[in-house]
Image (cartoon, rainbow, N blue to C red):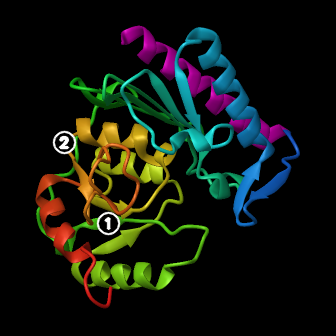
């Protein structure tokens, strides 16, 4: 696993330098998946770099990537070696010159995610989580916040490109705003969750895609967070890969947030 960790960290840094350089030096081209979700030429170049590097180093491993193999996430299991990758998490931020974007790389095997790496090249922050070995930011250990009072907590969330169901999301946001100190939205789910792991945020909830959260979820878990959902996980689905209604927080706040967010009549 240490060889895999060294490889993933180096790959995340190399990819981060590529996307930083592309934005500084190149004329980015843009397209939209399903007419709503932005993709830049840098996303595709970063995806090629990651995919080719993994296939060259570990040809027997599977790959789930947002840009090249999203369909592989359907029915995903973690029993055999698999990499779960988002070349640029926070593409809209990236395309608009914001600095909250990151490379996200997770590795899973034998039924669980074992390594998570999230790298923001614009702040040079490398978040790493190793299963059973803790989490770090630039090689220094990190822990979730110790806040226990929801009315003093900063909670993060996000909103999808597809606006179906937006009314329920706004209702949930209204409930959370009534009970917490304030809400943040970085525009990168991976960084939202890593900031929670580092104690910069106190809770996080959203529905995501597998590549958005796999690496960051492990980092938060290893930093002491409780990682779960605010709705029931369907029978037969591994909670590690269930992407709907995620809830991540320190243990005390998780217990307070879950009942507030649970689906109920009128919400």
Res. 198 in view: no
Residue shown at the point (20%, 67%) measured from the top left: 258
Choose top left, top right, bottom left or bottom right for residue 163. Answer: bottom right
Residue shown at the point (60%, 43%) measured from the top left: 71
- Placement of 265 over or under 58, stated as above or below: below
Which SS class for mark 1?
strand
Residue 30 screen position, x and y as percent:
82, 54
Residue shown at the point (37%, 11%) measured from the top left: 2
Q: For this view, does 42 lie left or right of residue 29?
A: left
Q: In the rendered structure, which disc, 1 or 2, sits on the residue that comes first in sequence?
A: 1
Answer whether residue 3 is magenta in the image: yes
Residue 63 screen position, x and y as percent:
56, 28
Please name the residue that numbered disc 2 is placed on.
Answer: 224
Image quadrant in which the C terminus is located = bottom left
Q: For this view, does 122 lie left or right of residue 254?
A: right
Q: Mostly what secondary structure, the magenta segment?
A: helix
Residue 212 screen position, x and y as percent:
49, 48
Region rendered in magenta: 1-25
């Amino acid at each position: 696993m240490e060889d895999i960790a060294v490889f993933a960290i180096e790959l995340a840094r190399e990819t981060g330098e590529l996307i930083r350089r592309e934005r500084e030096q190149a004329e980015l081209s843009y397209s939209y998946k399903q007419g709503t979700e932005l993709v830049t030429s840098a996303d595709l170049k970063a995806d090629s770099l990651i995919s080719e590097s993994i296939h060259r180093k570990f040809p027997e491993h599977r790959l789930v990537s947002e840009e090249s193999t999203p369909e592989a996430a359907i029915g995903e299991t973690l029993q055999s070696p698999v990499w779960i990758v988002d070349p640029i998490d926070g593409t809209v931020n990236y395309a608009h010159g914001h600095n909250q974007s990151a490379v996200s790389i997770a590795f899973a095997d034998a039924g669980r995610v074992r390594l998570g790496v999230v790298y923001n090249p614009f702040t040079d922050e490398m978040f790493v989580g190793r299963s059973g070995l803790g989490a770090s930011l630039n090689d220094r250990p990190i822990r979730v916040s110790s806040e226990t009072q929801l009315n003093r907590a900063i909670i993060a969330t996000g909103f999808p490109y597809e606006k179906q169901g937006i009314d329920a999301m706004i209702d949930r946001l209204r409930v959370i705003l009534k009970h917490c100190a304030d809400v943040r939205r970085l525009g990168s789910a991976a960084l939202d969750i890593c900031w929670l792991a580092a104690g910069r945020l106190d809770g996080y909830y959203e529905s995501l895609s597998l590549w958005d959260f796999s690496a960051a979820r492990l980092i938060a878990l290893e930093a002491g967070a409780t990682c779960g959902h605010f709705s029931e996980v369907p029978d037969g689905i591994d909670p590690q890969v269930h992407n709907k209604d995620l809830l991540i927080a320190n243990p005390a706040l998780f217990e307070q947030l879950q009942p507030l967010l649970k689906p109920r009549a009128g919400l």
